[in-house]
Amino acid sequence: MVRMTSFIAGLSLLAVLLATGTPVQAQQYPPVGGRQFPLNQMSPPGTAAQWAINAGRVAPNYLQPVRVTLPQDGKVTFYESLERPVELAAPAQAALLVGRMYRLKVTGMEDFPGVEFFPSIELIDRLHPPQGREEDFPIDFEFTTEEFEWAANGRLITKVIYLEQPDRVPTELLERTPRITTIEPSRNVLAEADDLGRPMAIVRLGGRTPDPHRPEPSFFGPGGPIRLPAKVTQASAQQRPDAVNSR
């Protein structure tokens, strides 16, 4: 099952393709737009990001602002690594390195007491906002209650966020808010996103959690640098003067 959702992020029109259901082998995906797409939602995590770097499509040192929105109050933790978590109240904004995959932790939601979710974000492209206003144009990652319910029941959800090209988007989708389309898991989500615009990120949300006693660093992935917005950094400095200086 694949779901597509569109929304506005700053001046950029973004959409989401969401896939759930039984995995399908890559060779079973039919061509999209008359061409075969080499990657799909079942490619190993991090592959699409690495291909984007190798192809020279994105600069590997660019920190792209992202904003994670939950369906209710909660906490979002970004992991630079297992030893360096950064916890923020939702909606949580931070800048992540393009071409990397980051692990997150979502906790504290009233509808899911005591439940921890560990989605991942794989950034494969960046936005191009006006210079000096990068923090005003984050890529939005908006989770729904339904998605967390699926994950709590052991299902894997894969979301592909892409920058829409309006002349390729069906009119009925442009008039829907939020714009959600469900398609079969036998279709290549990355190819569908590429046909409608420019894929920006892949989000994976499932029921897998780390061992609470001996968490494996590999579960948290390669991670990478995290930069907080200036307003968040200033607030942290007021509350804990040593916290910012130690980073």
Image (cartoon, rainbow, N blue to C red):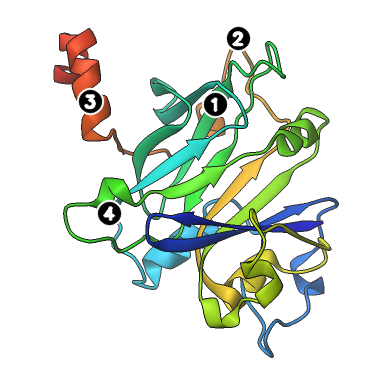
Front label number (3 vs 2): 3
How far apart marks 1 and 2 lie (CA) works out to 16 Å
Whether residue 235 sits left or right of residue 205 in the image: it is left
How far apart marks 2 and 4 lie (CA) works out to 35 Å
Which badge, 2 or 4, comes first in the chain's sequence? 4
Name which residue lies at 57% across and 19% down.
215
Which badge, 1 or 2, comes first in the chain's sequence? 1
Report the residue marked by disc 1: 105
How far apart marks 4 and 1 lie (CA) works out to 23 Å
Report the residue marked by disc 4: 62
Residue 193 higher or lower than 109, as above or below: below
Front label number (3 vs 4): 3
Front label number (2 vs 4): 4
Name which residue lies at 84% across and 50% down.
21
Q: Which element carries disc 1, helix, strand or loop?
A: strand
How far apart marks 3 and 4 lie (CA) works out to 19 Å
In the rendered image, residue 188, in percent from the top left (x then y), is placed at: 72, 68
Disc on res. 44: none
Q: Amino acid at mark 1?
A: Lys
Q: Amino acid at mark 2?
A: His
Which badge, 4 or 1, comes first in the chain's sequence? 4
